[in-house]
Image (cartoon, grey):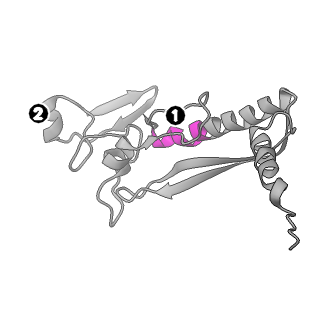
Amino acid sequence: MSLRIGNIATSLPITYNPYVAATGKTEAAEDSGVIKNAGASTVKSAGRKSSPAQCQTCAERKYQDGSNEGDVSFKAPTHISPGAAGSLVRFHEQQHVANAYAKEASGNAKVLQASVRIMTAVCPECGRTYVSGGETSTRIQYTNESNPYQKARKKADADLLPGINFDAAV
């Protein structure tokens, strides 16, 4: 078969693929399976169970937020394609940073530090490096009136202080 693109002619080999012949779908990889991750390589690395395109682990990987902030994404387990995970995880972590600065804007707090760490891992099935998650670290200084932890600490200290200097004379 010959394909002509403009003035350039290319020759494409015609091969028989039993998966395509049986199902009519062209999404089969060369050797043994269905493409589960579109756009990924179909080349299987040495020592790996599958290629990135056929990787079941990458196809089923889900991300979920573990924080107590209700207005950020990924509260429910959500699948993200390995190619899009980096930008979506960075966006998610930026939502946490934005929440910290929103607390500062309310006038009751000051953001002392905010940083984001993006973590990567290697898929054990296909060997692809992917973004495995992120972590936002913030240090916020609250005014004494608005910090519920400071109020609880003052109450606990007040309960301890009355008997701290007890001196009994015999």
Q: Quadrant of residue 50?
A: bottom left
Residue 55 visible in the shown view: no
Q: CA distance from mark 1 to mark 2?
A: 39 Å
Query: Residue 74 appears at what percent x and percent y?
Result: 52, 34
Query: Residue 134 appears at what percent x and percent y?
Result: 60, 47
The residue pinned by badge 2 equals 22
Query: Residue 25 appears at what percent x and percent y?
Result: 22, 30
Looking at the image, residue 49 lies above or below residue 109: below
Q: Quadrant of residue 27?
A: top left
Label 1 crowd (10 A; few <14 / some 14-19 / many >=20): some
Q: Secondary structure at mark 2?
A: helix
Which sits in the foreground, 37 or 166?
A: 166
Badge 1 amino acid? Phe
- Using residue 100 as the reference point, say whether residue 81 is left or right of it: left
Looking at the image, residue 70 lies above or below residue 66: above
Which sits in the foreground, 10 or 85?
A: 85
Residue sitting at 59 percent across and 40 percent down? 67
Badge 2 amino acid? Ala
Instruction: Check the picture and name the quadrant holding the N terminus.
Output: top left
Residue sitting at 78 percent across and 29 percent down? 102
Looking at the image, residue 60 lies above or below residue 74: below
Part of the protein shown in magenta? 81-89
Q: Which mark is residue 74?
A: 1
Instruction: Check the picture and name the quadrant holding the C terminus.
Output: bottom right
Q: Is residue 143 magenta?
A: no
